[in-house]
Image (cartoon, rainbow, N blue to C red):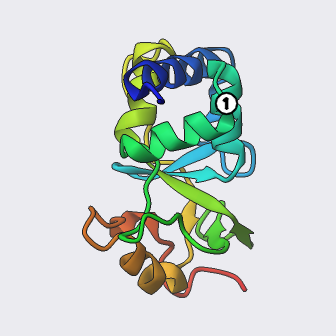
Amino acid sequence: MIDYAEILPRIEKALGDRYRGNPDLFNVPGISLACKVDPFTYVALRPAFVDFAAKWAGVSQKDAEQTLVRTGNLLVDQDRKRLDGPLEVLADEAGPVMRLVVDFVPAAFIDRAVVLYGGEPAPPPVSRLRVHPRERQRLAAFFSGKTPLLDLAFAPAGTTSA
């Protein structure tokens, strides 16, 4: 049986320790494992985010993934599934559209790791990464029953290329 209460703090500490040595781990579109798109949510690269978190915490990928999902630190839809297919995002409002396979992570989880173990006095701000506006409907369905992404997470209509 997986001890989520033991694994989750190990993952959190591992992420914070890695952030301390490499602040580009979060919030640099095109480089980071995860970027904060609104005050409550990070978009994290799949499978890289879970794979690296597991490796750094010294747990299996399967146990790390299950721990994050079961504790609500890797968001799933009402059917307990992760977002299907790539998400269209932009590194900034006018940048080219990128299609990335992602997971969503509550900001509180990564922010806590960065503050408690990463040596930051405050959580990171929202990054430049924006979700393409045509993803609104799909994400509204995915976040049904949860706090949805704020408007801030989406690039304004008409400012996006492609």
Quadrant for the C terminus in the image:
bottom right
* In-front residue for pair 31/109: 109
Q: Residue at x 70, y 33 (%)?
A: 52
Tell which residue pokes out farthest to the front in this image. 1
Rendered location of residue 156, percent (x, y): 47, 78
Of 123 and 147, the residue lying toward us: 147
Q: Is residue 14 visible?
A: yes
| Residue, disc 1 | 60
Q: Residue at x 54, y 68 (%)?
A: 83
Count up the numbered dots.
1
The 10 Å Cα crowd at callout 1, few under 14, some 14 to 19, many 20 or more, is: some
Q: Residue at x 44, y 61 (%)?
A: 76
Q: Quadrant of residue 160?
A: bottom right
**Residue 98 placement, left or right of 116:** right
x and y percent of residue 130 in the render? 54, 64
Q: Where is residue 5 shown, x and y percent of the image?
A: 37, 23
Residue beneath the point at 47% across and 37% down: 67
- The kind of residue tagged 1 is Ser
Label 1 element class = loop
